[in-house]
Image: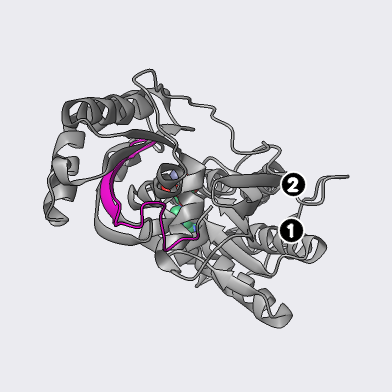
Amino acid sequence: MKNGMENMENRDIRLLAVESSCDETAAAVVLNGREVLSNVIASQIDLHKLYGGVVPEIASRKHIENINQVIEQALKEAELTVHDVDGICVTYGPGLVGALLVGVGTAKAISYAADKPLIGVHHIEGHISANYICHKDLEPPFLCLVVSGGHSHLVIVRDYGTYEIIGRTRDDAAGEAFDKVARSIGLGYPGGPKIDDLSVQGDPEAIKFPRASVEGAPYDFSFSGVKSAVLNYINGCKMKGIEYSQADIAASFQEAVTDVLVDHTMLAAENYGIHKVAMAGGVACNKGLRRKMEEQCTRRKYQLYYPEPVFCTDNAAMIGAAGYYDFINGKRDGWDLNAVPGLKLGSD
Ligand code: KG4
Ligand code: ZN
């Protein structure tokens, strides 16, 4: 396949992208897979906060209310109409089925009405491809740590659209562990950014939480143990009538999780001889993780890539970046494109 800055027809390709897999309704226009012409995100976080997490039925309803305006806004900011774009990309999995269906249905309708090609995009491919937006020079092969609310994967990106999953979580995803621990220490939803901020005030060495590894699977993750250890620590303090520091728990928990993420990534980079390392997904915003990964990559002279925070959490620009490589590779979907909540990636 051609590299990132070219395409088969050697002309500019503008793609409208739609993302609605969880609690953000998003649309974007992306030029040649790397340049963001617009990136509109309507977040539902304030609504779901009331319930301590994403309520799928509410998410679907909100997507329906927002999606048309979000798409119109994305086209307006790019100063284009739907007739000017070369195709419509949409996330079709993994994610919440009702939420995905809103995006898929809308994208199909636009594609049909405007007679534009339709390209279904894998959400995790999108997260990985966010790195192409922020690092114009990045090309496969590279190793990517994908850490979001639903996934914790170590992926070798062999080529555009070619993925080999070498590590996965056995239980909770990293972001899920952040969210659950935040809830147990009373920080509310979404917990990741709150733990990240509070950690600055705490001592990461105050409490020794476990760093789990999975026997025989050196790149796999398991976060349920550290989550239980936090709950046990809190319950123990309560039973003994000892006051505990939220900040110390946050910092020590973050330290335990990020130690494992970085150690496994470094081990994989070393064993596979891949010295370009990327991060993707909401947890890639984490300041502790970024710092630790930077230290370790610098020490080993590895090149490190991660997207700006707005492209780490859910957005449609990343879907337009991933969709571009599908588009120039000739991938097209038909009217039978459906939402696939458990969609697998590459060798998964
Ligand atoms: O990638 P994302 O927006 O959605 C999914 O595809 O899941 O990731 C959301 C997850 C949430 O669990 C959130 O708590 C976590 O990313 N997150 C963070 C931070 N910002 C977002 N976790 C740790 N530190 C952060 N700064
Ligand atoms: Zn995501």
Q: Is residue 8 visible?
A: yes
What amino acid is found at the position of numbered circle 2 in the picture? Asp
Q: Nearer the viewer, residue 53 or 139?
A: 139
Please give the name of the residue rendered at 28% of the width and 26% of the height, measured from the top-left corner.
Answer: 108
The number of numbered discs placed on residues in the rendered structure image is 2
172 is higher (above) or lower (below) than 7: above
Residue 155 lies left or right of residue 84; in this view the side is right
Q: Residues within 10 Å of mark 1 (few under 14, many from 20)?
A: many
Task: Please name the residue that numbered disc 1 is placed on.
Answer: 264
User: For the view shown, which residue lies furthest in the front direction?
Assistant: 9
Residue 35, x across and y down, in percent = 32, 62
Based on the displayed image, in which of its 4 quarters is residue 136 positioned?
Answer: bottom left
Q: Are marks 1 and 2 in contact (CB under 8 Å)?
A: yes
Please give the name of the residue rendered at 64% of the width and 63% of the height, measured from the top-left corner.
Answer: 252
Mark 1 residue's CB less than 8 Å from ligand 1: no
3D distance between C-alphas at marks 1 and 2: 8 Å
Instruction: Give the numbered dot on residue 30.
Output: none
Residue 198 lies left or right of residue 25; in this view the side is right
Colouring mode (rainbow / by chain / secondary structure / one colour): one colour
Instruction: Give the numbered dot on residue 220.
Output: 2
Image quadrant for the C terminus? top right
Q: Nearer the viewer, residue 257 or 240?
A: 257
What is the span of residues highlighted in magenta in the rendered image? 3-30
**Kind of element beneath mark 2:** loop
Q: Nearer the viewer, residue 254 or 72?
A: 72
